[in-house]
Image (cartoon, coloured by chain):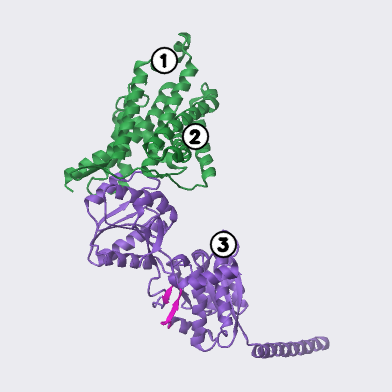
Amino acid sequence: MSIQDILLQQLANGLILGSFYALVALGYTMVYGIIKLLNFAHGDLYMIGAFIGFLALSVLSPLIGDSWVGILCSMVLSMIAVGLLGVLIQRIAYQPMLTAPRLSILITALAVSMILSNGVMAFTDGEYLAFSTDLGYEGLELGNVFITYTQMVLVGAAALLMTGLYLFVHRTMYGKAMRAIAIDQDACRLMGIHVNRIIALTFFIGTSLAASAGIMAGTYYGSIHFFMGFVIGLKAFTAAVIGGIGSIPGAMLGGLLLGLLESFGTQIPFIGTEWKDVFSFGILILLLVFKPTGILGRTEIERM
Amino acid sequence: MIENHLIKKENQMRKTLMLSAIGGAVAGLFLCGQVMAADLKIGIMVPTTGSEATSGKDMENAIKLAAMEINDGGGVLGMQIETMTGDDACDPQQGTAAASKLVSADVAAVVGGYCSGATLPTLKIYGDANVPFVIAAANSTKLIDANMGNAYQINSTGFDQVATAVELFEKQGAQKIAVIHQGDGYSEDLAKLTRDKWTEMGKEVVAYEVVNKGEQDHSALVTRIKSKAPDAVFWTAYYADGALLIKQLRQAGYRNLIAVGDGSNSPKLLEIAGKAAEGVYCFSNPTVDYLPAAKDFHANYKKTFNQEPDAYAALAYDGMKLMADAINRAGSTDKDAIIKALGETTSFTGIAGPVSFTDKNTLARSNFVTLIAKDGKWMLNE
């Protein structure tokens, strides 16, 4: 492989990884934008999404097979289920805390995260489950760069979801209401916007995006585990901060950027793969020093 | 004064009496020993309680089975073996107590040792009492240094796994290899030993990499490895992340040899990696499932104990047989003679393979076996 091939391949790797980060980062950023909560349970909802998708697929696969149709159906089911779970969590755990000091709700979010991951651990005995699907390794070979069809479909699906979200937030009344709440909740209430309903909707959309990423990762990597949300939760949070937390295009950009940084970071001479995370988190620190609001973050004018 | 004198005399008489009584008892014991010399007492030291009780009991069963077979075949030097179990509970303190119990019961020899941590402090006790000790399962390299010369390890150590791995790579014509570990003590050790050995042989380690635990996406690493075109990739860590790496290597079009260490010896690896795992090699301790010579043992064990033999049953069984073989060759139950005979073992072949020892009392030839994944199952590579 020539150096160009390697870099091209790493570009592809980074884009795929980055789409996962972006999908999860979106939920972080939306929730933060609307109620200024860092929802640390977000990574765990990604994990729950993978597990519900796994359950749905094992029930559905005798009927419709475990290829694309089956995966798509279980993904939709899982997104709805996890979206509702997100709303439920918001209602039970976060809603009563909205007027409490910011730290209380942050700790509540950590508690929810523990409950979710340990609950799944208890159910699965901490075992790795094999997420077997019928997806093959066929793909396109461009010179020495190899991309499987599965990878292309995953990136395509992520792009579709993100475009859909962008249009929803910027072209619909609901989206307008979300953006309005992000600016001033009290004013929205006075204008007759159902604030609580819109917050619930935001949670639904944010967590179902995480669930979609979870099931995509499950089918793509082939195994799921109760702890799988932890690392990606951290990375997605990082991505959201890089892009400017609260900004939707920022989360997408931050996710892709972090994915690319990690991929190219392994390619730097004399720095082994063990430094991959040091490299990407180092960039994060540098960025925060020079632009604390993130790439697309604006200071307190508008979020979303 | 007189009273004192009388008391002294009485004391003296008592002493004499006591001495003669002790003498008589000793003589009696000696005579008894002569008359009842039909028994050869062998100690078994394994954990029969605690977290590792299942494995310990499995070893105890296997040792007892070996003793029964030896007894049925006429015993050792005409004596019948009688076993006595000391429970080390996989705990250093309990291990010390168990060893002291066995030594004070005057066993002729000891077979067992499952947990390295519990076995380590017992080496001094057996060493001081000069009791021949065959360590069947415990295989920490620390045992090598603490050995006082009376103990013999019949389970391969980390060094042996490296030897088996390197042998496979060489046989498959590999020149350039990539070694990947996970940064923990176990997998890093194995990786380091492999790298050193391979470079020592004048060959090239083109990639020596670490993967963070819990990382799911290895694509960047895979691209890096693929660009260096190694003939073999050796994963030294555990099955869950190993399965993902194997999958992604194959997905990216890497077609050469992949091997995994014994930490990845799990059916779960094959389940997660699916068809990508076909043809992957794995190194394993000699467990009953993969030993062609263990068929009879397997059947007998099942018949006698009504359960399946576990991971170290084969080695425990071999340990007892080896001990009996050494006592036979020593021609007496003299401890020095048995220890010497153990060290001179050259022609003993157990179900886990032939046994002979290095000058450090470890196995001269690795008994690690190489497995290959075929149709979603681990099979012995022949």
Per the image, label 2 sits on a secondary structure element best described as helix
- Residue A224 position in % (x across, y down): 43, 43
The amino acid beneath tag 1 is Ala
Is residue A247 among the parts visible in the rendering? no
Which shade is chain B?
A: purple
Q: CA distance from mark 2 to mark 1?
A: 28 Å
Q: Decide: few, some or many residues near mark 1? Use Cα within 10 Å; few <14, some 14-19, many ≥20.
A: many
Q: Residue furthest right?
A: B3
| Image mark 1: chain | A
A213 up-or-down from B99: above or below: above
- List x then y, in percent, for residue A1: 18, 48
Asked whether residue B3 appears in the rendered view, the answer is: yes
Residue that sits furthest to the front in the current view: A63
Q: Position of residue B273 (x, y in %)?
A: 38, 50
Q: Is residue B310 left or right of residue B10?
A: left
Q: Amino acid at mark 2?
A: Leu
The amino acid marked with disc number 3 is Thr
Q: Position of residue B17 (x, y in %)?
A: 75, 89
Q: Which residue is mark 2?
A: A110
In 3D space, how far apart are the residues under numbered discs 1 and 3 (Cα atoms)? 62 Å
Which stretch is magenta?
B344-354
User: Mark 1 — residue?
Assistant: A177
Q: Quadrant of residue B27?
A: bottom right
- Residue to which mark 3 is pinned: B54
Residue located farthest toward the top when viewing the structure as drawn: A191
